[in-house]
Image (tube, rainbow, N blue to C red):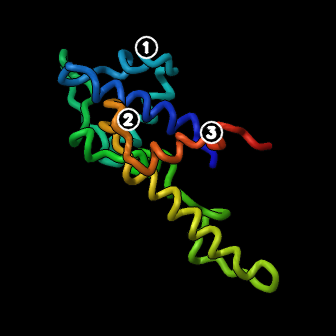
Amino acid sequence: MHISAKVDYALRALLFLYTTEEESLPCAVLANNQKIPQKYLEAIMSSLKRGQIVASHRGNSGGYYLARPGNSISIADVIRAVDGPLAEINGHKPEDMDYFGSALHLKTVWIALRASMRSILETTTLADVADGHLPQNVSDLAKNPDSWTRRN
């Protein structure tokens, strides 16, 4: 699975927002704190705002803030807000794909992959990550030494 820079930056900014005690933070502060290019983060924050992950207000104390509690914002919510659906094949939903012959069962693999991603990304929230209390299924997978080994 490819995690885009947009998703990585979005999660880092959101985790900082979750853990700060400030009511709201300007994009410049978020960008500086997480070493993210500000113009790029501004575009990401706009996507997060459209996705109802963050809200903002103007003024001297203006900036971005979480639109809902951190324990109700999943990593899947963030990915969908900035990158779109979790699993697509050439811009199509896995269930809309048609395969034939020896590739007939490939659709089942794509559906299973999406379900597997959902089981982690939809159950892990900003609060889980920031507080270090990850769901058991995530912790169990990460404890497996093979999970830490990259395969080319």
Q: Which residue is mark 2?
A: 129
Q: Is 50 left, or right, of 106 in this rendering?
A: left
Residue placed at 58% from the left, 63% from the top?
A: 113
Which element carries disc 2, helix, strand or loop?
A: helix
Q: Is 131 left, or right, of 82 in this rendering?
A: left
Residue placed at 59% from the left, 77% from the top?
A: 96
Nearer-N-terminus badge (3/2): 2
Residue placed at 70% from the left, 74% from the top?
A: 106
The single residue placed furthest to the bottom in the displayed view is 101
Residue 14 in the image: x percent, y percent? Answer: 36, 32
Which element carries disc 1, helix, strand or loop?
A: helix
Residue 104 in the image: x percent, y percent? Answer: 73, 82
Mark 3 vs mark 2, foreground winner is 3
Q: Which residue is mark 1?
A: 32
Within-10-Å neighbours for mark 2: few <14, some 14–19, many 20+: some
Q: Which residue is mark 3?
A: 145
Residue flagged by tag 3: what amino acid is it? Answer: Pro
Q: Is 116 left, or right, of 59 in this rendering?
A: right
Mark sitting on residue 21 = none
- Asked if the residues shown at circle 1 and circle 3 are in contact, with their CB atoms under 8 angstroms apart, the answer is no
Nearer-N-terminus badge (1/3): 1
Residue placed at 39% from the left, 48% from the top?
A: 136
Residue 8 in the image: x percent, y percent? Answer: 51, 34
